[in-house]
Image: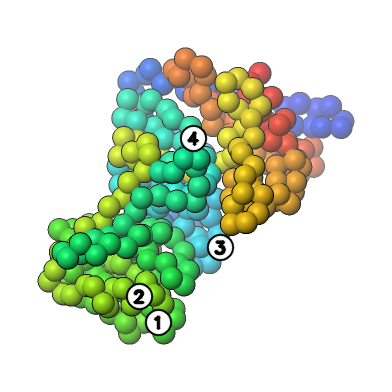
Amino acid sequence: MKYTHRVDTPPDLPQDIHILEIDLNNPAISFQTGLGKDVAVGRETIPTQADRIENSLAAVNADFSGFTGSTQAPQNICVQEGELITTPNFRTAIGISQYNETRIGFWNSTSPPAFSWQGFVRDEQGNKHGVIQQNQDLNPGWLCVNTYHYGESHLSRGGEFEDEVEALIDQDGTVISIHDNGDGIPIPENAWVLIGRTTAGQWILDNLTVGEKVVYGRNTAPDWREYPTLVGAGPRIVANGEYHSDPIQPFNGADVIENFTLDYKTTYYDSRHPRTSIGVNEAGDTMYWVVVDGRQEGKSGLTHEELADLMIG
């Protein structure tokens, strides 16, 4: 690995830039996804996460998250050591195979990409219901899943609403218990909890019984199982050696870039901010981590297009 610290001092655009160049052909190099407190909704600084990983040499921030409750989970797909932690949305992600092959793009099952993936549960009678998210937020009518890695206490989120129903299911797919009392359920390792409100909660009550088997399908295109290290990012800013902006297209009746409205693009993409970027060269044998400081005196940050120029150059 090669580290470069670059300080540019033009008065109109002073920059403080950190660049890490990584040889992907080096058999001693491997990658691992870090999670705050090793759970989906944990909060922890990057240095303390790195300290817990044996033989770690470098670490960098990845996906976005919220600040409270289940919104603290990564907003996009996350795979840690081959285990699916959270599900994909309409944003770019970066996956690294066991051979350090890298893919940057969408992990959705629809074309063109959308806020969708092929997650589902199916009971013994063949009744099937889509699963919207795993270890992330829950909206009315959504059927979602919590796993052992949801939170530090290894409890499900619990019923924040009177109509919330939860079913505990073991690693073999057997329904262990069904709850509608609002308390979080302890989740054994490799088990999972199916959660629903309103119509989704009623589907659990109508279709699942203790002792029966259910199937949980978790499919993406490309297959997330091929990338034991996979983290959300976005948007993509370079494609085929040129500046690229992820598509503007209708989403929930509005024109958006990624899954954000256009005012978000103006505020965060076209203005200067601190930035983190990961990229690979055309040959796919070298990865670059770039961090640009900002919001401090002498550190201006970059727009997305300026960051793309830095990555290309």
- What x and y, as percent, mark residue 304? 69, 35
In the image: residue 154, left or right of residue 260: left
- Residue at 33% in and 84% down: 181
Q: Earlier in the sequence, mark 3 or mark 2?
A: 3
At mark 2, the secondary structure is helix
Residue 63 point in image, percent of width and height? 52, 46
Provide the residue designation for mark 2.
201
Measured Cα–Cα span from mark 2 to mark 4: 33 Å
Check disc 3 and report the residue beneath it: 67
Query: Do callouts 2 and 4 mark residues in contact (Cβ within 8 Å)?
Result: no
In front here: 247 or 166? 247
- Residue 253: image quadrant is bottom right
Q: Is residue 129 left or right of residue 173?
A: right
> Label 1: which residue?
163
Check if mark 1's residue and mark 2's residue have beta carbons within 8 Å.
Answer: yes
Mark 1: which secondary structure? loop
Looking at the rendered image, the disc whose residue lies closer to the viewer, 1 or 3, is: 1
Q: Residue at x 53, y 55 (%)?
A: 65
Which amino acid lies under the numbered mark 4 shown in the image of this protein? Gly
Give the residue type that dot 1 points to: Asp
Q: Residue furthest top?
A: 283
**Which mark is first along the chain, 4 or 1?**
4
Total residue callouts: 4
Q: Amino acid at mark 3?
A: Phe
* Residue placed most toward the observer, 45 or 125: 125
Considering only vertical position in the picture, is 123 above or below 164? above
Task: Find residue 148 and report its horizontal and vertical position in percent.
Answer: 29, 60
